[in-house]
Amino acid sequence: MPDLRWYFDPISPFAWLQWPRIAALAAERPVQLRPILFAALLDHHGHKGPAEIPAKRRFTYRYVSWRAARDGRPLRFPPAHPFNPLPALRLIVAAGSTPPAVDAVLRFVWESGQAADSVEAIAPLAARLGVEDTAAALSAAEVKQGLLAHGEEARELGVFGVPTLLVDGELFWGEDATDMALEWLRDPAAARQRYAATDTLPEAVQRRPAR
């Protein structure tokens, strides 16, 4: 059985766009759903998030809106973005990181356009997921540690962005890489042969940090 893991953060609209195909894949075979804090990943790699570059933020929001409309996917932005996704991430972990829990949280943020950046905001959803005493559940040591463990695992594997689908140790970053990942899953030998040349391509120059 292939090792399939999906690393995601509800802060990313691309997680919402990719979710239907991940859910379909999870209905066919085991997929480990791994909520992780995108901001921690950015800090680890020394990257800026898309929303931290004004022109990129503007384009990304436009592109996501266009993609959703093109694909007939409902999309409603939350009241503010970026937002603190920790309550949503911890709720997913507290609810068992199951497909229904992931689906509910992503729908809450990206279909209903609800704020998910505080215990109070997410409490109604937590109740629907059977998570009682939202504040206690989200602050539980095992929930916090579970989320941290997912992040550590992602960093050790080299995950650098969300969403990322891992297929037997190979990373496929972004919603637009879904077909590539599924092709690898179907015939990994052929895929390895196809990418052999690019995997060993030498570097001719490296950018020096600005002084």
Image (spheres, rainbow, N blue to C red):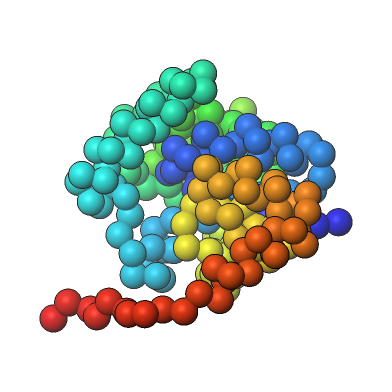
Drawn side of residue 209 relative to residue 185, left or right: left
Q: Can residue 178 be seen in this snapshot?
A: yes
Relative vertical location of residue 178 with respect to residue 202 in this rendering, above or below: above
Seen in the picture, residue 208 relative to 71 is either above or below; the reply is: below
The answer to whether residue 4 of the structure is visible from this angle is no
Tag count in the figure?
0
Vertical side of 193 occupied by 102: above or below: above
Quarter that holds the C terminus: bottom left
Q: Which residue lies furthest to the left in this view?
A: 211
Judged left or right of residue 31, residue 45 is left
Which is more toward the observer, 114 or 124? 114
Question: Residue 206 lies in what quarter of the image?
Answer: bottom left
Task: Residue at 38% x, 26% y: name it.
Answer: 66
Which quarter of the rendering shows the N terminus? bottom right
Task: Tell me where residue 16 appears, x and y as whole percent.
Answer: 52, 35
- x and y percentages locating residue 105 in the rendered image: 55, 35
- Which residue is situated farthest in the right direction here? 1
Which of the two residues, 178 or 122, is positioned nearer the viewer here?
A: 178
Residue 134 location (% of width, % of height): 54, 41
Query: Residue 45, position in %: x, y?
Result: 40, 70
Q: Which residue is drawn at 56% across and 47% down?
A: 177
Q: Residue at x 30, y 59 (%)?
A: 48
